[in-house]
Amino acid sequence: MRAGNTQTGRVGRLLLKRPAAAALILWMLCIPAASAGSPKALVSQFRLRGPRTVTVLDPVDLTNGLPDPVAGKLLRGSLAENPAWKVLSADSTAKQLRDLGMDADHPCSEFQCAFDAGNALQSEFVLFGTSTDLPEVNAYTIGLAHIPSSQMVWSRVGQAPKRPGDNSHARRGTILEGPLKFAVSDLEPASLDLRKHPSLGLLGVMDGGQSTPHSRVAMHRALAHAYASRSYDMLGPAELDALVAALDLDHTKATAGSDDDIAGGTGPASAHGLGGSAFSGSGGSDMLALGKQMGVRYLLRSEVRNEGGQYAMDLSLYDVSAGRKIRAWPSRETTDYASLLNLEDRFMTALGEDGPVAARPLPPERHPWRSFFKGSSVGLAILGAGAFGYMAWQSHAQADQAYNDFKAAKVRSEADPARSRVIEKDSETRKFGLLGGLSLALGVVVWSF
């Protein structure tokens, strides 16, 4: 006990007598707290928190606007194999939603409804998307919403090709099993970047032609790609349709969509939350006018046409604030719909961190006060260097004069004071020269920043 008290007293006396030692000890104690904000520390904490809760909503089949339980079951099974995830069962999810007064069978292919469901279920993540049974392929989009930060943090698109003669419904689970498992195989909670990314502006994604299952697949793939870039504030098809209806921009829409139209592959399908023909006009001026009325920075328009068994796709990107079309990719007609999906993949790679234009974004403008203080600091540094240089030159001249007096002295009483002045002025010369050099170096450093 006595030894322990003695040691404690020494540490206390050390902290009292030596403030530098106290600051060092406090700094060392603060290192863990400061490092907790680093990316590596965040990843470590993410791993230590245990399995992450994720709710899987059945993807929506864009041919009929209904949830696809087969695809949902495959996604839940794939994520359940990873111990880093705690997957809510389909029965538990449906029961909790009903207890909360929500429609558990409501199709959800948009971020907003996924966020609402995750918020109600108190689930940290929600996996949602589309799974569309087309004659040529089974196309899918998958998105992962992080509810606490209210953002999309991961997404994937893909398609499972069909072989001639395959029954599209009987073998649906077999066709989708491999692609869907592969799509989420690398989905690890610790690898997700949950930080907010800077936004390039509000981007609206719309299906500008006649709404068909093929066109809706292309539109939702474009939406998933745009979310994956994490460079935009997104205005999805459901929000865009609601905004267009509120602004009364399309009078033809009110008479366009019934359930029979949706099942048959025509009509806007907005009642099912799939998005559809948001605007009847197709010209560039019409799109720019629409974008201005909606208040978006960018507008992405996709259109898929199917005439006589030949598919064609038009993709257009508009910079509404600049009043111009950035790029347009009209495709040739083809019977291979999957090749058009590959075309859409290449087009959407332009929507990355560098923005939708080829040139890199301009550097941010400097604040005028920052430029003023920088220029003033550099100017003072140059003036200081000049002043110290002049003083060094003057001391050097005085040292030369004192040396001449030393050499001309006849007696010791005259030589000793002259010798002292030589030493003093040489010291001043070195001191002023060093200060001048430091002042000049400081000006260079300030100028470089």
Image: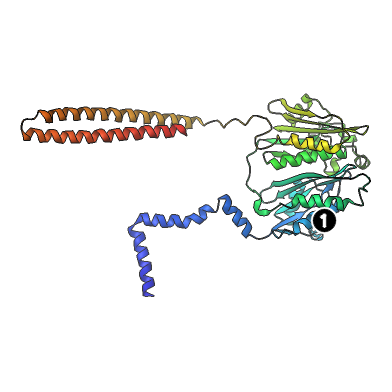
Q: Which residue is located at x 77 percent, y 44 percent?
A: 157
Q: Which residue is located at x 78 percent, y 53 percent?
A: 181
Q: Answer with left or right where residue 36 lies relative to residue 55.
A: left
- The image shows residue 298 at horizontal and vertical percentages of 71, 32
- The image shows residue 347 at horizontal and vertical percentages of 75, 34
Q: Quadrant of residue 135?
A: top right
Total labels drawn? 1
On screen, residue 170 above or below 3: above
Q: Which residue is located at x 19 percent, y 30 percent?
A: 399
Of residue 376 and residue 401, the one placed in the foreground of this image is: 401
Q: Answer with left or right where residue 261 lies relative to residue 234.
A: right
Whether residue 204 is visible, yes or no, is no
- The image shows residue 212 at horizontal and vertical percentages of 88, 38
The amino acid marked with disc number 1 is: Lys
- The image shows residue 161 at horizontal and vertical percentages of 85, 44
On screen, residue 145 above or below 342: below
Give the position of the N terminus as an image quadrant: bottom left
Whether residue 388 is visible, yes or no, is yes
Which residue ends up furthest to the left in the rendered image?
411
- Give the residue at mark 1: 73
Q: Residues within 10 Å of mark 1 (few under 14, many from 20)?
A: some
In what element is the residue under mark 1? Answer: helix
Of residue 91 and residue 144, the one placed in the foreground of this image is: 144
Q: Which residue is located at x 84 percent, y 50 percent?
A: 176
On screen, residue 314 above or below 69: above
Of residue 126 and residue 286, the one placed in the foreground of this image is: 126
